[in-house]
Image: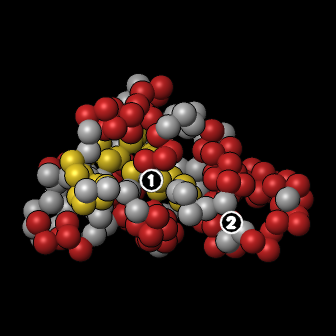
């Protein structure tokens, strides 16, 4: 049992093993249906980074060679402008950006998040795996928003996601007139 496409999880234990559908299958489906670029909301930093690594394993490229060239140019400009800080930046994040993939969460340096935002706004990133902090105030319009669960850990343990929070997350795709996808039961 596992992901059933648009219908949720066939086996609830599969959901416990992974916060979202297997990332390569999810991205193949979104790509096939012309639903990229996408923001996939995952409510943990580690989950965002793990999903980005799974996306990197996808055999079909998410970005074309012309887009890779533009990404490399923007990243090179970024590195020139921030040379003194490069030692503190995660090299793997730069590699993922060149594949059209990024994480976005509070565990990243503000410069890393700003670079991901710039590339997404330029339509050069095809998927960003983000925590809910991305939904507040940043203009990163996506064709598709995927919300991976209807609950999250809070001050009082696992709590249901408030309707207002869900609308805030779903609103990330509103400017491209597409529907959010809920990857939960």
Q: Which residue is mark 2?
A: 94
**Quarter occupied by the N terminus:** bottom left
Q: Is residue 134 above or below residue 108?
A: above
Quarter location, residue 2: bottom left
> Foreground residue, 5 or 39?
39
Q: Position of residue 78 (x, y in %)?
A: 81, 55
Q: Is residue 156 something one can see in this rendering? A: yes
Determine the secondary structure under disc 2: helix
Check the image and tell me how it is coloured: secondary structure
> Foreground residue, 110 or 48?
110
Q: Is residue 117 above or below residue 107?
A: above
Residue at 32% of width from left, 56% of height from top?
A: 155
Residue at 88% of width from left, 64% of height from top?
A: 83
Quarter location, residue 9: bottom left
Q: CA distance from mark 2 to mark 1?
A: 19 Å
C-beta proximity under 8 Å, tags 2 and 1: no
Q: Which residue is mark 1?
A: 131
> Foreground residue, 81 or 133?
133
Q: Position of residue 128 (x, y in %)?
A: 50, 52
Q: Residues within 10 Å of mark 1 (few under 14, many from 20)?
A: many
- Which mark is on residue 79? none
């Amino acid at each position: 049992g596992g992901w059933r496409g648009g219908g949720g999880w066939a086996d609830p234990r599969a959901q416990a093993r992974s916060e979202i559908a297997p990332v390569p299958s999810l991205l193949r489906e979104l790509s096939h249906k012309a639903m990229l670029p996408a923001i996939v909301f995952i409510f943990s930093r580690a989950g965002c980074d793990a999903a980005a690594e799974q996306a990197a394993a996808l055999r079909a490229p998410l970005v074309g060679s012309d887009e890779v060239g533009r990404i490399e140019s923007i990243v090179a400009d970024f590195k020139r402008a921030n040379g003194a800080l490069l030692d503190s930046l995660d090299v793997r994040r730069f590699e993922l950006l060149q594949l059209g993939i990024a994480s976005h969460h509070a565990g990243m340096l503000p410069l890393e998040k700003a670079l991901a935002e710039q590339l997404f706004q330029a339509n050069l990133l095809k998927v960003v795996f983000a925590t809910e902090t991305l939904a507040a105030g940043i203009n990163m319009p996506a064709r598709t928003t995927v919300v991976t669960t209807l609950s999250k850990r809070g001050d009082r343990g696992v709590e249901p996601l408030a309707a207002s929070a869900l609308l805030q997350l779903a609103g990330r795709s509103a400017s491209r007139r597409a529907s959010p996808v809920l990857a939960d039961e």
